[in-house]
Amino acid sequence: MDDFKRDGSHLASFPPVEKWDDWVELDPEAWPRRVARHYELVPTICFNCESACGLLAYVDKETGKIAKFEGNPKHPASRGRLCAKGPATINQIHDPDRILYPMKRVGPRGSGKWERVSWNHVLETFGARMQKAIQEGRGEEIMYHVGRPGHDLIMDRTLQAWGIDGHNSHTNVCSSSARLGYLLWHFADRPSPDHANARFILLLSSHLESGHYFNPHAQRIIEGKMSGAKLAVMDPRLSNTASMADYWLPTYPGTEVAALLAMANVILDENLFDAAFVRNWTNWQDLEVDGFSAQGQTFQATIEALRRHYARFTPQFAEKETGVKAEIIVKIARETADAGSRFASHLWRGSASGNLGGWQTARALTLLHVLTGSVGTEGGHNLNAWNKFVPRPFSVPPPQKHWNELLYPLEWPLCTHEMSFLLPHFLKEGRGRVEAYFTRVFNPVWTYPDGLSWIEMLKDENKIGLHAALTPVWSETAWFADYVLPMGFSAERHDLMSQETHSGKWIGFRQPVLRVLQEKHGQKFDYTYQANPGEVWEEDEFWINLSWAADPDGSLGIRKWFESPYRPGQKITVDEYYGWIFENSVPGLPEAAAKEDLKPLQYMRKYGAFEVATDVYKLNETTLSAAELSGSSVRPDGVVTKENKPVGVMVEGKAVAGYGTPSRKLEIFSQTMRDWKWPEFALPEYYRSHIHRAAQAASLGQPTEDFNSQYMPRVDWPEHASGEVFTLLPIFRLPNLIHTRSGNAKLLYEISHKNSLWLNPVDAKKMGNVRTGDLMKVHTEIGFFVLQAWVTEGLAPGVVACSHHLGRWRLNEENQVERLSSAWVDLKEVGRGQWKMRQVAGVAPYESQDPDTRRVWWSDAGVHQNLTFPVHPDPISGMHCWHQMVRVEAAGPDDRYGDIFVDTNRSHAVYQKWKALSRPAPGPGNLRRPLWFPRVVRPVEQAFYMK
Ligand code: SF4
């Protein structure tokens, strides 16, 4: 530990907190000389993915600059450990191409000409637009559209203070499919697996290397394994995660539910299920299936009906659908049942987000938890709402009165989140316009499917009145904005964050490191941009000031929500906003702070995180308090109601909280699905995805069985499309990149900068001995892209894959998307709605303030596949079904690496085909959406009813 005492430096896994004010290390650049450097350490939260791991910023005492980022050992979820993207934050804050000042477009949209403006100008311009729109009753023309939220609480509160229904998110291209499957079971729309204490872990994801909360989860999965847990991974691709597993189950894409229901069948058939749990905690009495009704029937008779219903999911049927051997499925089913209440699983994207009907994956996976009694248990499947902690602010504005159909249209009443990826198509259909559009850390032109329809929309001032891109980095979307507003990275802003990373509860505090440090040493700032590089700001202060600008005299009733709880009538500061929360709504924090003679805000500035609770299990069994029971009554079905709303349920003679569903039980039978026109899916079911082999045969006009035409449209290939038909997996993440926000991290792009087309050797041979590096042309329903092949046994025949993240592009040589990671392209509209992109030059060394940019040795930036994907809104969950049916052939003599062609007329036609499969509202009682379904920013109850 004290090897370097002579110069005061230390060797330690993590710097102990008592040394954070003066931490000494030897300067690696001075080696072999021993030069000690002194650092002051400030905790913050990583902003490079949703996990919210704790960072420690090392501020060099001599230069006053941040020298590096490492893990915060005091953070309860990440516990000092980071993935590669956490430390790469240092590249992002020192990126020579970063946006330092607010910029306003000059010339037409998309022409790439900008002038610097002041923050005051921005606030006045947008404040005036908003004020006018709200005064004229057009509040719904103000839209906030978020990519990476990276914060809890403040934005929802801000939008409700404005009184508008204007929250749009990226979730329907991300996770809304799995969320629906979970929601139908237990209201909570995400799982919180207790991997560390599990005996058997089933991952339908590459969760040791990427995915939601993967660093906090990965370390706990490994802990579980080290304590003897077995790990099974269901993934068509041999990911790094699959390579670490005891069992790899390479299911054919979209057939995972068949395997899961076959496992359920084995567990039921062999009587391996937890009967007491199923009897007590499911709504089995509501079951109606195959002519059987559980009303008046015994539990045993109901189980027999379930057995009969799932009997068709034999392991042999599952083998035929999935390609995984029947005996392996049986073995996994028995090991899952053996683990009992210590069975953990995780599902994110992949199967759920790739496939039509992918929401059933979460439905079927949770059925296994229900049968094994592993819901809410140590080592089992917990609920996100139990482990995520969101505190209360100093005042809460009332819910908005309106319902914005650009966000929640009638066609998808069961979508868990806003139908955001369809916005260009909604505006094309004349469903409305957007007067003031705030995109925040959001790059739909690149990350969404059908990006050229987004470009067409963003360029049209009749559709988008004024667009501000709030972003820490240049992006393909920012290029088409009216204003580009620089917002801070993780060391340059305040945010509260909490995630369901394990069986505890915690809250993390992101903070602007240089401001915090300088204020600690006596300097004062009015705003964070005064301490950050250039005039990089943070959203918290921006929204507070914009709200004042929109309602300068308070007459709209907005301003009052942004007045200080300590200084009536004065504008609230961020210290006051967070200080109030830490003093009043984080249990245990004031006491912990008092022990160190600190105020709660000082405590959070010192440690960056606080553990609110540990070992959170079985909250469904929480006994209702006397106050909760006062004035309540018990319905015949055992549900405890108060003011006509379910608040609990009777279980074994006790009134307990239960789950947030209408029955307060785990809903194996969903009356909601029946009521909302999908009675065939009241139970967990399997139906074929849009990329199933039957759908492929149908696309070629070949005779085929079980093409579910009532659920999926037939693919109509463009005339130019030819070649073998494959399923393309386009959404797997690389461990060291994150969507488009890591483009300015030289450390990360030096490692990964190419996205080839994965192709099995069997297919390569069939296609004329394709070899790694050969140019391939991949046709989708609306266009094509050209890239190199990578022949590998890492995925099954009949499937091709291409990683997410890569293929960044920019429209000029110099900048406006990071030169480290983007190709310079020529983009032309060659006919109405027909777009061609060709790379002019790849990545190359360049001059900048960072000498490393002269040392760039790679030239590839990858190929942007998403542009060529049509939208595929799942008729039920509304999720964009990412997997693509494609035709692949060798590139022709006129094709060049990176070429892209897209016809947005075709993309609109594909949208119409998918939309036609939905079953629109109204539901019962003229509702737009089930009343018990959540919404991110929930309006008043009356707004749920159609007029
Ligand atoms: S997993 Fe990596 S990128 Fe995500 S928050 Fe943690 S360190 Fe940052």
Image (cartoon, helix red, strand yellow):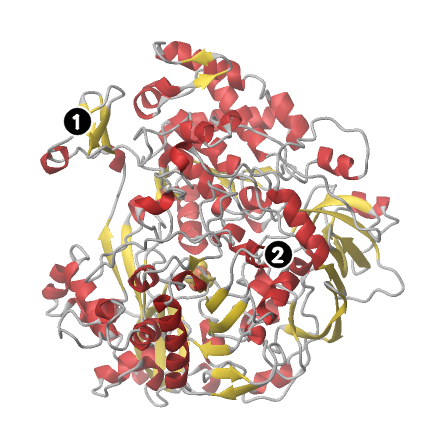
Q: Which mark is residue 449?
A: 2
In the picture, which quadrant includes the N terminus? bottom left
807 is higher (above) or lower (below) than 588? below
> Quadrant of the rendered structure where residue 458 is?
bottom right
102 is higher (above) or lower (below) than 580? below
In the rendered image, residue 336, in percent from the top left (x then y), is placed at 46, 29
Give the left or right position of residue 111, taking residue 891 as reference.
left
- Dividing the image into four quarters, tell me where ligand 1 lies: bottom left
Q: Which mark is residue 633?
A: 1
567 is higher (above) or lower (below) than 930? below
Tell me which numbered mark, 2 or 1, is placed earlier along the sequence.
2
> Quadrant of the rendered structure where residue 140 is?
bottom left
In the rendered image, residue 118, in percent from the top left (x then y), is placed at 41, 87
Give the left or right position of residue 548, taking residue 364 as reference.
left
Kindly identify the amino acid type of the residue bearing the numbered disc 2: Pro
In the image, 284 versus 225, the foreground residue is 284
Q: Is mark 1 within 8 Å of ligand 1?
A: no
767 is higher (above) or lower (below) than 704? below
Mark 1: which secondary structure?
Answer: strand
Can residue 721 be seen in the rendering of this structure? yes
Image point 56% across, 63% down: which residue? 444
In the image, 893 versus 197, the foreground residue is 893
In the rendered image, residue 80, in percent from the top left (x then y), is placed at 35, 62
